[in-house]
Amino acid sequence: MTMTMPASAAVGADAQRFAQVIGQELQAAIQRAAASSSSRGFGTRDLGAELPQPGTPGMGTSTPGAPALGVPGVGAPSFGAPGVSAPDVQERFFPLLAALLPTIVSAVPSIIQTIQGHNRDIIAPSTDPEEIQRGFLSVLGSLVPHLVQSIPDIIAQFSGQRDLPASDDEVATRWLGPLLGIIAPHIIHAVPGIVNALAGNRRDLATSQPLSPEVSTRFLGPLLGAVLPALVPAVSHLVSVFTGRRYLPQSQY
């Protein structure tokens, strides 16, 4: 008897493979931007000059069989967070981006599937690889600029942390909770772009406030439900960036 894979499972597998390719390419772009900022001084070029813009062919090192990629809307980080100096950002911005960005990339397939599951009446999953890639990049492109904008706030929050946590409970209260509290408001601003990417035929939803009842139920709740748990593995890297030491979780908090 021949087993047929459900369309949703095939779509998920395609999106996961695409996420791996994009994650590798973005990591390469971050490394080049970090090396450039160290050698030339932060401010002489911005992150947007290193990460690809719309229409830019390729992204970083070439991967056999990988499509030409471009993540729209990624610009220079802001230094507007209170208590954050340019040297603070120069030292910690790229390590934080390298820690957080892969979690967002890996969460995108789950974000898409979860939102589709809450919107079966208006979003039909596609099995077309090109359409899956376009949807993936559109969702990622909606999230990344807001993640970038949260990093100075993260630096301001944790710049005084020097002691390694003594337990997973301390990690959860002193690190994970504040991290989610900082990122969540930024992620909310990505909702209109995600609505437009996945349900562009519903302009009424795309132009509604993210906290409106219908948009919250259809998009914001599923988005936060997929993104915030995905950030948990990044906390150990966050601890390392600010304490200079590696924390090994005692369990999965």
Image (spheres, rainbow, N blue to C red):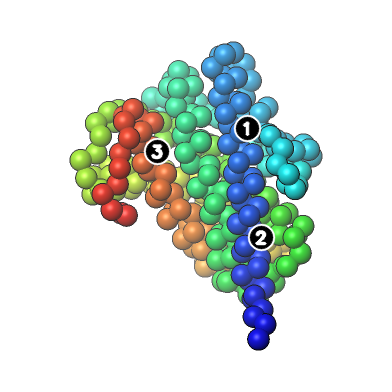
Height in image: 210 above or below 127?
A: above
**Is the residue under label 2 in contact with that under label 3 (CB below 8 Å)?**
no
Height in image: 74 above or below 180?
A: above
Left or right, 67 with respect to 3, comes to right
What residue would you read off at disc 1? 29
Q: Position of residue 112 (x, y in %)?
A: 60, 61
Label ID, residue 237 = 3
Q: Residue furthest front?
A: 1
**Is the residue under label 2 in contact with that under label 1 (CB below 8 Å)?**
no
Label 3, label 2: how far apart the Cα atoms are = 28 Å
The three-letter amino acid code for the residue at tag 1 is Ala
Left or right, 145 with respect to 238, comes to right
Q: Residue furthest bottom?
A: 1
Q: Earlier in the sequence, mark 3 or mark 2?
A: 2
SS at mark 3 in the image: helix
Label ID, residue 14 = 2
SS at mark 1 in the image: helix
Height in image: 252 above or below 27?
A: below
Q: Earlier in the sequence, mark 3 or mark 1?
A: 1
Quadrant hosting residue 91? top left
Mark 3: few/some/many CA within 10 Å (<14, 14-19, 20+): many
The three-letter amino acid code for the residue at tag 3 is His
Q: Position of residue 70 (x, y in %)?
A: 72, 41
Label 1, label 2: how far apart the Cα atoms are = 23 Å
Q: Is residue 44 visible?
A: yes
